[in-house]
Amino acid sequence: MLQNNEIHVFIPAYNEQNVIEEVVKSVLNCGFSNIYVINDGSTDDTVKLALKAGANVIQHTLNRGAGAANQTGITYAKRKNFNYIVFIDGDGQHYPEDIEKMYDLIRKENIDLLIGSRFIKDKETVPIVRRLYNLIANILTLGLKQGKYSDTQCGFRMLNRKAIETLNLEIDGFGYCSEMIWKSELNNLTIKEISVNVRYTEHSLEKGQDLITGIKTGFDLIWKKYFN
Amino acid sequence: MKIRIFQVVVPLIALLIICLYVVRLRSGKSTLKEIFPTLLFLIGTCIFAIFPDPVSDAIAKLFGIKSNINAILFFGMGLLFLVQLNLYSNMRKQEKEITQLTRELAITEFEKKSSNKFKGFLYLVSFMELNILD
């Protein structure tokens, strides 16, 4: 039976006033009450609406990036000794209903990092442009990792206690997606992918990575690996 | 050898700056590690200003460049690139520190608010209990 108090849901968000209330409510409706919106320096009403929807809000005073927001979640989870945390995008792209099956799998197979993949099944729901960006990102991540992954860029991820204790992300931007995989491998964490559903709306398509961001992400990874 | 004005002015200015840095070093305001690259650059500038042709010819010969003027240009560009790389590295370190500060502030503020909310809840419960007992 799902112990929803065991799972802490982190939602990194930057200027998501249009959807954050809906995202938080959809997580609540799935039975998860430990919800933390990590507000990454939003300039709109994201905080107000997240609080109204019933989430806890951890606020960055400055916008630092998706990676920074994720690491804030990991740092907080480490301090509070959480056993399982899940990251879900704040743009409403992911279905919180998938959290339960992620939790079942992570416990059953004792996985440390479970990555949601949009490409294991039904990849036609993902727009072609996004698939291309992900292909580029996968190729860039290729040089840094050993395993084979279908979707290195999905932000829908679940971590267990070991991963929470071990990981320390240093890339502030979207490069954290690849950095998390790379550092998990370096620390011999068990990584697996699970098929997740995804929906793209006009709003979520405006968010996320574009080509320029992708190039910057690649550069960040190379700099991190070879110059840091 | 005909002495040109820059062969006097540039070394004098460089020597003045070197002296200022040495004073800073002796007073403990800077460390040798901090000022060493600058001192090296200033000494190099002095030598180059006093012996421009021999130095530029030596650089051209070292790097296999035909013209000594091109050698100076390429050497200068290389130096600027290294300076740029160093600045970029420092900028990234500072960005990392800003993120760490932002994170600590965020978590501290959140924990403070959570603790205040909990205290408020406790006060409310105590108040209600007192009223019930009365």
Image: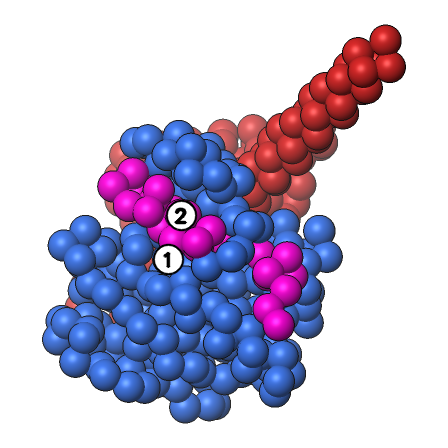
Chain colours: A blue, B red
Identity of the residue furthest to the top in this view: B134
Residues marked 1 and 2, same chain: yes
**Which residue carries the number 1 mark?**
A89
Residue A206 locus on image (x, y percent): 18, 53
In front: B64, or A185? A185
Q: Does B69 sit above or below residue A158?
A: above
Q: At numbered mark 2, what does the secondary structure look like: helix, strand or loop?
A: helix
Q: Does A224 sit above or below residue A120?
A: above
In front: A84, or A134? A84
Q: Residue at x 47, y 68 (%)?
A: A99
Left or right of B10, for residue A1? right
Q: Which chain does the residue under circle 1 lie in?
A: A
Q: Quadrant of the N terminus of chain A?
A: bottom right
Badge 2 crowding class, 10 Å Cα cut-off, few under 14, some 14 to 19, many 20 or more, is: many
What's the residue type where badge 1 is placed? Asp
Range shown magenta: A1-29
Res B126 → quadrant: top right
Res A16 → quadrant: top left
In front: B65, or A102? A102
Left or right of A212, for residue B76? right
Q: Which mark is residue A55?
A: none
Badge 1 crowding class, 10 Å Cα cut-off, few under 14, some 14 to 19, many 20 or more, is: many
Q: At numbered mark 1, what does the secondary structure look like: helix, strand or loop?
A: loop
